[in-house]
Amino acid sequence: MFRNKREFKAEFHRRLVEAYGCEMEQTSPAEKYLTLGTMVRDYASNYWKDTKNETASQDLKQVYYFSMEFLLGRMLTSNLKNLGIYDIVTEGLQELGISYQEIADQENDPGLGNGGLGRLAACFMDSAASENYVVNGNCIRYRAGLFRQFINKYGEQVEMPDMWMRIGNPWEIRKLKHAVDVKFYGQIEVSYDENGDMHFRHRHASHVLAVPYDMPMIGAHTKTVNTLRLWSAEPADVAPRDRDYRQYLSDVEAICLNVYPDDSTEEGKYLRLKQEYFFVCAGVHSIVETHLKNHPSLDNLGEKVAIQLNDTHPVLVIPELMRVLMDEYGYAWDKAWQIVKETVSYTNHTVMAEALEKWPMQYIENLLPRIAMIISEIDRRYCAWAWQQCPDDPDLVSRTRPLRDGTLHMAALALIGSHAVNGVAGIHTEILKNDLFRDQVRLYPHLIQNKTNGVTPRRWLMYCNPELRKLLDDTIGTAWEKDYHHFEDLLKHVDDPSVQEAFLDVKQVRKEKLAAYVRDLTGEIIDPSSMIDTQAKRLHAYKRQLLNIMQVIYLYQRMKRDPSFRIAPHTYLFAAKAASSYTFAKSVIKLINCVAAKINNDPDTRDVLKVVFLPNYCVTMAETLVPGSDVSEQISTAGKEASGTGNMKFMMNGAITLGTLDGANVEIDSLVGRDNDVIFGHTVEELNTLQYHYNAYDYYQQDGRIHDVLDTLINGFWNGSADEFRMIYDELITRNDTYFVLADFDAYVKAQEEIARRYASRNTWARSCLVNIARSGYFSSDRTIEEYAHDIWDLQKLHF
Ligand code: NTF
């Protein structure tokens, strides 16, 4: 492997010519990217091998993080910087007359997720490797990603396939030797041996071959390289039984075609269940295979392996591991159950009722007959046990058992089969304990714990905002880069005017970069000296992008009506994908775009008010959007956003949170104090009372601002059609405003006024931003991973 710039240049040149059979100058940027990516992967391969060997020789416990999503973002820069070879490579390329940026821009974001849950998994992979914990990912290799979002001339979202691997994926390695046979459908034949023991044979199954592709997860400034294993479905070498051959091929193909386009509602699709079992079965098989290479039996599996279930999507790990232990390795039920519970733990990421997965048992009986038998037995044993625990509350059993009215409740199964369950922010965990899983807390008082989410400060500060990194290095030294506690060293400097000025300069540079990005992407010109206020996250009613755009409409109407009223220049940026079947969310996107089209073209207001919707929000966009924003919109209905992680990224880059007391905003608020954020709106407790007497129509009647804003939704003001946004109007008025948008409107307008007031005093504003950065160390995913390792996984670090 290359050790310096000279060797890098020679090797890069040699590899390009050998791979493409032409002069280096004739290769395309994509070919250069693939070559460079492959070189970097190979560079990491020695460390990768060492990590595997050392894990085995130190007989270390390792974690498998099962997640349907890993929203990695581009890997090239992150890998180069984590490996410490960024300078060698970029300078080497420059000497060869090649632009690094042009090469880096060839990389597509891997289409392996939806939103927060998948991005969290990616931050965890970075932190675990960087902290020398052996944590491997287990996921699906989706070929067409989620979707690429495009906005048409009517302002509507259009979905296009995200063929992210079209140019190839240099990071992955196909590992055919570890392929796994996964069985669906068929029947279970039961027989008894001479001892009376039962045996189960899966007959007439439809076989699918799960082929793993491994991606290295490279730690920063360490030799630890973990594995993200992506499973790909291929036709098996077994004749399909009783089914049409071409149908079989297309059924297999469908399994890894795309990510379910929804991170908050469960569509209940059969294919989704197939995906879930597919990657669970393959993942469990490879864990067992690896374990048995180094240990004589599976008796100590729970001591050497931890399996983390990222939400309920992989919960079939519980019955699948039972199946393997009993049917393939002859364990009795009780011993197998003990091993499963020791091994498995579960993270809940949402309390939204529609997002809590439920499956008709009939689907499972049909698709996974042996798994269905095991689930029924788990349910039967659970009922018998729980009945004895709480004889005073006979209904408790029926409220908490996994099988209710022929439906499998995945969260209930996860709770029973795990030794630890966690929420993702303080308030969320309290809601789990006091509300969603209240009954289970009676049965297992110590089961539920909190692990507040985090984000990796490498991708989300050091690499995406080098200007801020330099300011921190110059001000407090570099200790914060390796130890998140040292972010707080900045507190000593927040009152220093020269640091404040330097921060404002950094922000200005980042805002100019963002403005250029917005112009290239949308053609819109935004003013980099205006206050840039950003809401970037999936589009969902509870996140209330609607409240945000309503406030914009209100400002516009007020300025139109009263020429003496003018705001300081504001730019409102939105970026959000809506699930393809989520009509309401798509309607909000259209509203934002229609509002933007009108306001941005109005000479009366366009110098002070600008609205831009940025299409196709993704990790790469966030890397420019977050550092360039002044205000971080975190305005979900209290109690609905489990944590949020965008809030942490904005904070880390010196944006001020404008938010409700929801998710991790609560912790941000207690860390920075009310002088350094703007909090508004009803609290969870207040909403718990208000819900019984809430009447949205009263707000419409009594608040002229709300009245005027809502009327534009049904009078054709935005695009000439009176019915275009009636659905939104009806949700607020006829359906009584499920997410209390109108109840929080007044407070939100005042909060916007407050933040504008603060923004006007540049030095106090800068001071607040610095306090936010200083306090953001707590939200490093290095801290979160330490807590999982200590409290849930009982995991030791790898020593090199
Ligand atoms: C999301 N959940 C939550 O909605 C976010 O608040 C949270 O920050 C992330 O998880 C990460 O914990 C989901 O995506 C899902 F799928 F559970 F709905």
Image (cartoon, helix red, strand yellow):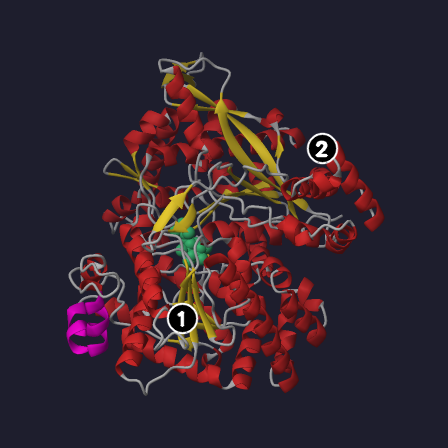
Q: Quadrant of ligand 1?
A: bottom left
Q: Quadrant of residue 610?
A: bottom left
Find out whether residue 697 is within the magenta segment: yes
Query: Toward the viewer: 543 or 485?
Result: 543
> The N terminus is located in which quarter?
top right
The answer to whether 621 appears left or right of 487 in the picture is: left
The answer to whether 644 appears left or right of 20 in the picture is: left
Q: Is residue 676 above or below residue 627?
A: below
Query: Toward the viewer: 173 or 629?
Result: 629
Q: Quadrant of residue 772?
A: bottom right
The image's mark for residue 759 is none
Quote the CA–CA distance across marks 2 and 1: 48 Å
Amino acid on which the number 1 mark rests in the picture: Lys
Q: Magenta residues, as a range?
A: 696-712
The answer to whether 735 appears left or right of 350 in the picture is: left
Find out whether residue 413 is within the magenta segment: no
Amino acid on which the number 2 mark rests in the picture: Ala
- Disc 2 on helix, strand or loop? helix
Q: Is residue 445 above or below residue 344?
A: below
The answer to whether 56 appears left or right of 791 in the picture is: right
Whether pointer 2 and pointer 1 mark residues with C-beta atoms closer than 8 Å, the reply is no
Judging by the rendered image, the residue that carries numbered circle 2 is 19
Pointer 1: residues within 10 angstroms few (<14), some, or many (20+)? Answer: many
Give the overall secondary structure of the magenta segment. Answer: helix
Query: Toward the viewer: 58 or 391?
Result: 58
Judging by the rendered image, the residue that carries numbered circle 1 is 610
Q: Position of residue 195 (x, y in %)?
A: 45, 15
